[in-house]
């Protein structure tokens, strides 16, 4: 009788130990969008101190604006085979961006301590936008 109870106890313990719970979380992957900003897309401010290119990106929705992350990169000014993340300053010129529902605006303007005015780009510039999903924990 003792052997039978011991055998049942061992079998039950082995059965419980072998059960494994797998939690599968399916996350939405990052999205990367690449555009070429054409020279004609850059519009000058009335005083000539800023050039702005507004790009329509329907993938940027209100959820991206409110909760999620948006990273923006442009062609590196010297090495066209790499990107540089905005905002940045190069040779006294400041590059920044604003994202909104449906798009993004890239600004080129002089930096605070520079007297040099920005020049309108004369060649296409690659723009890379990375949309990073996030969960609201509030």
Image (cartoon, grey):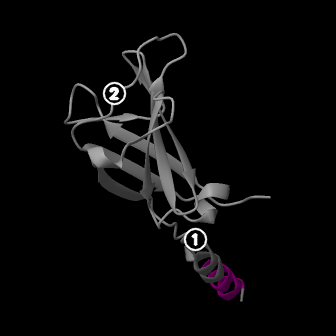
Image quarter of the C terminus: bottom right
Residue 84 position in % (x across, y down): 36, 33
Main secondary-structure element of the magenta-colored stretch: helix
| Side (left or right) of 77 relative to 92 | left
Q: Position of residue 2 (x, y in %)?
A: 71, 83
Badge 1 crowding class, 10 Å Cα cut-off, few under 14, some 14 to 19, many 20 or more, is few
Q: Is residue 36 rendered to the left or right of residue 67?
A: left
Give how far across and how far down residue 136 sits, in percent. 71, 60
Q: Which mark is residue 119?
A: 2
In the rendered view, would you say 134 is above or below 107? below
Q: Which residues are magenta?
A: 2-10
- Element type at marker 2? loop
Residue extending farthest to the right is 138
Identify which residue is drawn at 23% across, 25% down.
78
Q: Residues within 10 Å of mark 2 (few under 14, many from 20)?
A: some
Q: CA distance from mark 2 to mark 1?
A: 54 Å
Can residue 71 be spotted in the picture?
yes
The residue lying toward the viewer, choosing from 117 and 32, is 117
Q: Which residue is mark 1?
A: 23
Instruction: Answer above or below: position of 21 versus 4.
Output: above
- Specify whether residue 67 is in view: no
Q: Residue 83 in the image: x percent, y percent?
A: 31, 36
At x 52%, y 70%, the residue is 26
What residue is shown at x 58% (from left), y 71% (from top)?
A: 23
């Amino acid at each position: 009788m003792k052997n039978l109870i011991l055998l049942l106890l061992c079998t039950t313990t082995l059965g419980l130990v072998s059960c494994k719970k797998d939690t599968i979380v399916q996350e939405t992957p990052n999205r990367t969008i690449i555009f070429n900003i054409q020279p004609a897309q850059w519009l000058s401010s009335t005083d000539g101190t800023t050039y702005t290119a507004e790009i329509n990106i329907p993938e940027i929705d209100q959820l991206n604006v409110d909760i999620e992350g948006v990273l923006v990169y442009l062609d590196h000014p010297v090495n066209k085979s790499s990107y540089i993340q905005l905002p940045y300053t190069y040779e006294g010129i400041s590059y920044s961006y604003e994202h909104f529902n449906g798009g993004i605006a890239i600004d080129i303007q002089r930096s605070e301590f520079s007297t040099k005015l920005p020049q309108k780009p004369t060649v296409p510039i690659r723009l890379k936008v990375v949309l990073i999903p996030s969960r609201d924990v509030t």
